[in-house]
Amino acid sequence: MGRMRNEMFKLFTKVKRVKTVDQEYQMIREKSIESEKKLFSTLQTIIKLKNTLHEAALLQVEISYSLCEMTLNNLKATQLTNSILNASQDIMNQTISIHSSKIM
C-alpha cells in the first residue's frame, strides 16, 4: 500500500511537472509571438521611414534642380534686361543725336 502511494505520488509529481513545463512552454511561446509582432511592427515602421527618407532625398534633388533652373532663368532675364536697357540707351542716344543735329 505504501509502495502504491509512493508510485502515485511520483506519478502526480511528474504530471504536475509536465503541466508546469507545458505552462512555461505556452508562456514562452506567447511571449515569443508578442515579440515577433513587435519586431514586425518595428520593421514596418523602419520601412516607412526609409521610404520617407528616399522621397525626401528625391525632393531635395528636385529642389536643387529647380534652384539651378531659376538661377539660369534669372541670368537669362538679367541678360535680357541688360539688352533692353542697352537698346533703350541706344535709342535715347540716337534721339539726342538727332535732336542735337536739328538744333545746330
Image (cartoon, grey):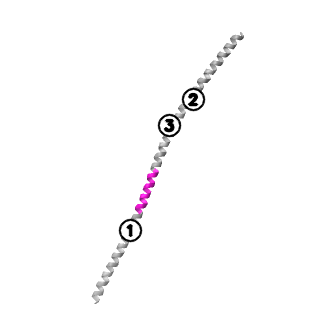
- Please tell me which residue is depicted at 42% across the width and 64% down the height of the picture: 34
| The quadrant where residue 28 appears | bottom left
**Measured from the top left, where is residue 70 in percent x and y?**
54, 34
Q: Spatial distance from mark 1 to mark 2, Cα to Cα? A: 72 Å
**Measured from the top left, where is residue 57 in percent x and y?**
47, 44
- Please tell me which residue is depicted at 59% across the width and 25% down the height of the picture: 82
Which residue was labeled with disc 2? 77
> Mark 1 touching mark 2, by CB under 8 A?
no
> Label 2's element?
helix
- Please tell me which residue is depicted at 57% across the width and 29% down the height of the picture: 77
Placement of the C terminus among the 4 image quadrants = top right
> Label 1's element?
helix
Q: Residue furthest bottom?
A: 1
Which residue was labeled with disc 1? 28
Q: Does 36 sit left or right of 7 as displayed?
A: right
Q: Magenta residues, as a range?
A: 35-49
> Mark 2 touching mark 3, by CB under 8 A?
no
Which residue was labeled with disc 3? 65
- Neighbor class of circle 1 (other Cα within 10 Å; few <14, some 14-19, many 20+) is few
